[in-house]
Amino acid sequence: MIAMKPIEVDGHTVLGIEVALPKTTLLVITTEKGYIMCGALDVGLLNERLREREIIAARAEGVRSLEQLMDAPLTMVTHTAEEHGIRAGMTGREALLKMI
C-alpha cells in the first residue's frame, strides 16, 4: 500500500509518502527542491553515479514513521545538500526547512 499525506513544517506544507513493502516500509518526505528518506536511500549512488543531477537528499536510519523521520538525526546527506547547508546530525525537520 502507498499512503501520501501533507505534513506541516513551520507553516510550510511538504508531502509525506509511505510505501508498505514486505518486511519494511519506505518513508520519504519531499519538498519541491529535495527530500529526506529512511535508511533505504543510497546516498553514495546519488553522490557518485548521479552527481550531475545535483539531488538534494538526506538519509535517517532506524526510523519507523514519518514523524520519526522528521525528528531523527540525519546520518548521510548528498554533496548538493551540503552545499545548501544540510549536514549529517541535524534533524530531518531542520533539513526540510532548508529545502523549502
Image (cartoon, grey):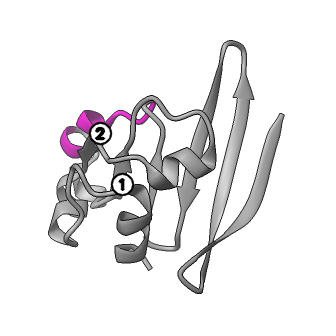
- Tag 1 residue: 57
Quarter of the image where one finds residue 90: bottom left
Q: Residue furthest top?
A: 23
- In the rendered image of this protein, does residue 46 appear above or below residue 62? below
Q: Is residue 48 left or right of residue 74?
A: left
Residue density around tag 2, few if under 14, some if 14–19, many if 20 or more, within 10 Å = some
Residue 100 locus on image (x, y percent): 44, 80
Q: Residue at x 52, y 73 (%)?
A: 32
Q: Is residue 14 left or right of residue 79?
A: right
Q: Residue at x 76, y 60 (%)?
A: 5
Quarter of the image where one finds residue 41: top left
Residue 42 locus on image (x, y percent): 35, 33
Residue 8 locus on image (x, y percent): 64, 74
What segment carries the magenta color? Answer: 40-48
Q: Is residue 26 left or right of residue 89?
A: right
Q: Residue at x 34, y 75 (%)?
A: 98
Q: Hey, what amino acid is under mark 1?
A: Ala
- Tag 2 residue: 43
Residue 41 inside the magenta-drawn segment:
yes
- Principal SS element in the magenta part? helix
